[in-house]
Image (tube, rainbow, N blue to C red):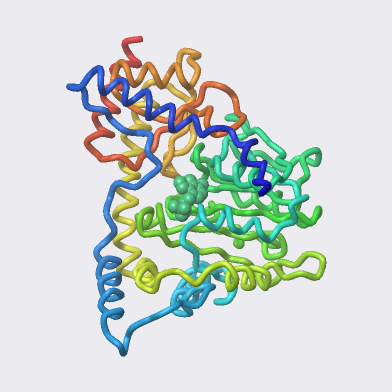
Amino acid sequence: MTKPNMNYADLKDSYLFFGIAQKVKKYSEENPDKKILRLGIGDVSLPLCKTVISALTEGVNDQAEKSSFHGYMPECGAPFLRTTIADFYRKRGVDIADDEVFVSSGASDELGDILDLFDKKNSALVIEPAYPAYVDANIIAGRKIIHMSSSIENGFTPEPDEKKKADVIYICSPNNPTGAVFTKEKLKKWVDFANKHGSIILFDAAYEAFIEDENIPHSIFEIDGAKTCAIEICSLSKTAGFTGTRLGYTVIPKALLRKGMSFNAMWVRNRTTKTNGVSYIIQKGGAAVFTEQGQKEIKENIAYYKENAKILMRVLNECEIKYTGGKNAPYIWLKCPFGLGSWEFFDLLLNKIQVVGTPGEGFGSCDEGYFRFSTFGSREDTLNAANKLKELLVKI
Ligand code: PLP
């Protein structure tokens, strides 16, 4: 009889988003006249910018002519896009070669696939609260997971701990869900720790475009020593609204070696075996993000989400509620007021003011009673939610 991968039985049900959807559905059925204000979503609400749409259209038209038609694309990415992305790094002072950049269909796909590079017996360190896929992808692979909880005291950016050594270390900055960012000094400590123990850091930079503080690194490769201990995974999903269009990129330095094996060479071998490349049309659209005009337009969209963040942060400040994020990230992670647990706060917001956020419990071990607001919603919903939230918190 076929033996299934029994590790799937160890996965916890994704009760978080299911639980939220169930509660919202029930409330809406019982209160059909009430409009739900959604501050829970991790998806963007603004469309792709004009420059990207023109490039995508051009890509479609190219496919209509024999002279410009593209069949299978190179598995590791179209040379034009690999060069464009490497140039983007180089302009920021990070010296990355074109063939150290791999084009992907998005960070989520890549975070799962990249685990092929690691032995099943490797352990994985996850700093929590965390994006749930880090834990789940390693459970599926049967790896030992070392959980490291962070707290508001260390700004949700803990330092390495000699008692928590691991082969693979996940760092997400700016962070989902906490919105916290690692400073250069803190990242340097992790890079030194990884080099000392021979670990590899998987650096998730999906939200780098939201960083506004000048001294916060956008890439782990801004840190000395990172090329011998890190892989960076990035995405255009939040940067440029590609959540439904799908494009990302991964940087694997050629200096990343263990036991005589090159991770860059292994990934080339992996991609040439397991993919037939990313769609030409989408890569054409992705390249437009990195043009001067593309950068200007995506920044306008990011500014819109940042204004949403300011609206919410103003209310939290006025009500003296502790939070992280909002400034360098599209998420705000707040301490639930009045000693409420995160589901209790969820119920309060849904039932009293029809605002939907995300209870912190779904992101792994951390202190009880945290809650995530996303700033990706519409301005109208965000403004209404902020006003209602203020009224509610003042009243209680
Ligand atoms: N990494 C983090 C931290 C995320 O929050 C997300 C999506 O929400 C992803 C990766 C996945 O992004 P993508 O849309 O590129 O798969």
Q: Taking 54 as reference, is 282 left or right?
A: right
**In the image, residue 247 lies at what x, y percent?**
43, 62
Q: How many marks?
A: 0
Residue 69 on image: x %, y %: 34, 83
Find residue 118 and report its image quarter: bottom right
Residue 71 picture quarter: bottom left
Q: Is residue 166 visible?
A: yes
The residue nearer to you, when weighing 263 against 196, is 263
Q: Nearer the viewer, residue 26 or 388?
A: 26
Find the residue positioned furthest to the front: 1
What percent of the width, then of the height, locates residue 390? 31, 21
**Camera-side residue of 43 and 7:** 7
Residue in the foreground of this view, choosing between 230 and 279:
279
- Establish if 303 lies above or below 348: below
**The C terminus sits in image quarter:** top left
Provide residue 151's location: percent of width, then percent of height.
61, 30
The residue located at (56%, 52%) in the rendering is 204
Asked whether, in this view, residue 258 is left or right of residue 318, the answer is: right
Return the residue found at the far left.
33
Residue 148 horizontal side relative to residue 73, left or right: right
Judge whether 391 appears above or below 83 on screen: above
**Residue at 70 percent of width and 41 percent of height:** 145
Residue under the image location 62 percent in, 41 percent down: 8
Residue under the image location 68 percent in, 36 percent down: 148
Q: Going by the picture, which residue comes out furthest to the bottom? A: 67
Q: Could you tell me if residue 328 is visible in this image?
A: no
